[in-house]
Amino acid sequence: MNTLTAHLRINGPPTQLQISGNAHLPTGEIRNIPVKNVQTQFRYASQQLDIPLFQADAFAGTLQAQAALNLSAKGTLNSHAEAHDISLDALKKALSLNLPGDYNPQGRISFQTKLTGSLQTPQASGQLTAAHLSFPTSTKLEDLKDFKLNFEHTPTTTRARLETHSD
């Protein structure tokens, strides 16, 4: 049986609540995605939600994230997330992705991403990497090595730079 263990602290009157805590889930699902070793810490006070720690094993790899959200009318976001050694097969299965054979990569990926700015118009930047991506059922694509995709997104511009090579 999967058991969520959580510790929650609530202080203050209803108009000035301060909430903090942590949680651990050895194995289970989050939004229908199988996960293991989930740990998180959180704090809320004065319309500010801080998540200094979120980590989990998912997609046969590891995920880590931190976030700070200001939930006032001028809400802001500052977050950082990383994933290491994620299996594309596990990711596609968990998300029910059925890609055409010519464009159905296999391999493991890692990424780092940062989200900042207002909640209405966030900005994102990051990098996705893979040592080797294969396309075993493709007649159009060759295996890719040292795959690196850098990206930036603002409300007015999206930029990406891809570096890779094949044999």
Image (cartoon, grey):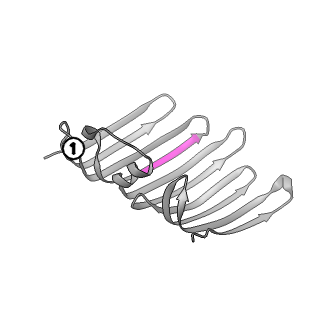
Q: As rendered, which of 61 and 64 lies closer to the eye?
A: 61
The residue segment tinted magenta is: 112-117
Q: Is residue 120 left or right of residue 164?
A: right
The residue under the point 19% across, 36% down is: 140
Amino acid type for the residue under numbered disc 1: Thr
Farthest front residue in view: 1
Q: As rendered, which of 62 and 94 lies closer to the eye?
A: 94
Q: Which residue is mark 1?
A: 137
The residue under the point 57% across, 48% down is: 78
Asked which quadrant contains residue 41, the reply is bottom right
Q: As rendered, which of 64 and 88 lies closer to the eye?
A: 88
Farthest top residue in view: 156
Q: Position of residue 86 (x, y in %)?
A: 37, 56
| 109 up-or-down from 73: above or below | below
Q: Is residue 99 left or right of residue 146?
A: right
Q: How many numbered circles does the render carry?
A: 1
| 163 up-or-down from 26: above or below | above
Q: Position of residue 61 (x, y in %)?
A: 40, 61
- Whether the magenta-drawn stretch holds residue 140 is answered as no
Q: As rendered, which of 2 and 6 lies closer to the eye?
A: 2
Provide the secondary structure element on which disc 1 rests: loop
The residue under the point 43% across, 61% down is: 62
| 60 up-or-down from 111: above or below | below
Asked which quadrant contains residue 142, the reply is top left
- Whether the magenta-drawn stretch holds residue 115 is answered as yes
Asked which quadrant contains residue 40, the reply is bottom right
The residue under the point 21% across, 40% down is: 138
Quadrant for the N terminus, please.
Answer: bottom right
Q: Position of residue 107 (x, y in %)?
A: 29, 53
Could you classify mark 1 by the number of other residues whose Cα lies within 10 Å: few (under 14), some (14-19), or many (20 or more)?
A: few
* Main SS, magenta residues: strand
